[in-house]
Amino acid sequence: MPAPTNTLLIEGSFTELSEELAQYLDVLRKDEGSSVHADVVPLLTPLRQQEQNGEEPNLQQRDEVLKKIVAAANFLSNAPEKEVTAAYNLLVHLVQQSSNPDIFLSRICSYLSKPIQSSPQFGATLALSILTTVFNTLTPSDSSRYHVFLAIVGVIRQAGATSSYDALKAQLSTQLPEWIEAWELDEEDAQKLHLAVAEAAEAAGDRETAHSHVVAALQTIDASESSSQEARELAIRALTSALTHPAIFDFTPLTASDAIQALRSSDTSLFELLEIFSADTLDTYDDFVSSTPLSSISGGVLADDGDALKTKMRLLTLASIASSASSRSLPYSTIASALGVDSADVEKWVIDTIRAGLIEGKLSQLRSEFLVHRATYRVFGEKQWAEVQGRLFVWRRSLEGVLSVIRTERERYTRELQQQQQAAQAAEDGTAKGDKKSVGDRRRQQQPREIDLVAADN
């Protein structure tokens, strides 16, 4: 799998290595067609002279040599298993000395995307190893990486190797967005890349990743092209994937797509089904299916998914009634009626909806009710904003009550503290006054004796 960028080191000059590879290709071709070596020798002569004189190589002449070699490089798939990797590494080394490696690398990638004839058992592993080496010898911003990455994804899809796909998946969410930005892909190439990843994910049984990349591919379609046949097919693919996937309940990314909105005219029934799954309940779904059989929608793309669709619709319906319950308590009878199931099956459906992450709460078998702690809003419009406003108002009143209690307690504490301080000050003042009075008494008691003594002297 792609790793940090590294360098491919091979000893020898361009002319020496080119001549060596041409001779090797002739051996693999077994005299099939003209000799590659004979074709490139005249082109290599002036290049060899430039190398001997220390002159700058003529890149146009190099490209002519590489055209001959790369055109015959498809025979490398016939090379002995132990020589395939070394031969392709040499080829890539030569191509990277071209004035425009991209035109050659894309063709090499197409060769590696096909089975390696000399190694039916380990061909895919060899191809992935070579492609990964090529990918990592290119700088992160090199657009040639795009073709190499497509080839890597294609080999993984064809081989169906779980371990290889797991290694790829680990980088899809973290590295791929950065790579797409660095490669500066146009909308067509970005769409091609996302669809390739989606196909590899489907081959590996990863429906969730496959769906996310189909939606990403859908988002690359320009508004002016949203009504084209290609856009319609991709929109139908994305929509049916979302409807039938057991873990996808948010259809907002789809409804925001111009190509999906175009289905309102081209595939009216399918678009109506999307609206039902986005906001309506099981009753509406049953009425729709009774009047519009699934087999008649967009060529029958949902003909075999009736049970899966009804199961998902029941989960969404329970989420709707839970989010709209005024008392936050749902009797089993209400749930059974809304889902069209027996009361004995209510707890099963509640548990399934909790597992889907649509609701949270507590079942009470004693009172035959479900206490709702949290429920997912399927549509958030004016009604939901009004409900949020009401809850925020209640929360605000509750907080105001708490603040009032805190304020009252703080004032009481302040008064008591002031009273304690005043009492302490009064006690301190009383003690000081008593001490002053005692000093005065002693002075008054001493004064007469002083007078008596003076009188005695007289």
Image (cartoon, grey):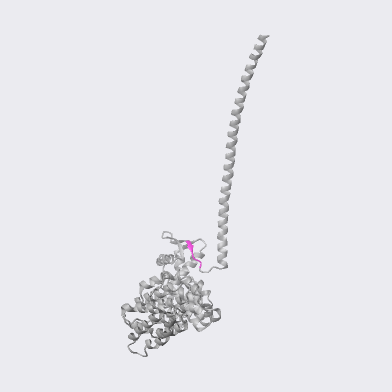
- Which quadrant of the structure image shows residue 175? bottom left
Q: Is residue 137 visible?
A: yes
Residue in front for this viewpoint, 218 or 35: 35
For residue 14, above or below residue 316: below
Residue 66 screen position, x and y as percent: 42, 83
- Counting from the top left corner in percent of width and height, residue 101 is at 45, 79
Residues shaded magenta = 373-377
The secondary structure that dominates the magenta segment is strand
Q: Quadrant of the C terminus?
A: top right
Above or below residue 419? Residue 245 is: below
Residue 408 percent location from the top left of the image: 58, 46
Residue at image point 46% right, 67% down: 318
Q: Residue at x 59, y 37 (%)?
A: 419
Q: Position of residue 429 (x, y in %)?
A: 61, 30
The answer to which image quadrant residue 335 occupies is bottom left
Who is closer to the viewer here, 293 or 415?
A: 415
State whether residue 221 is above or below residue 30: above
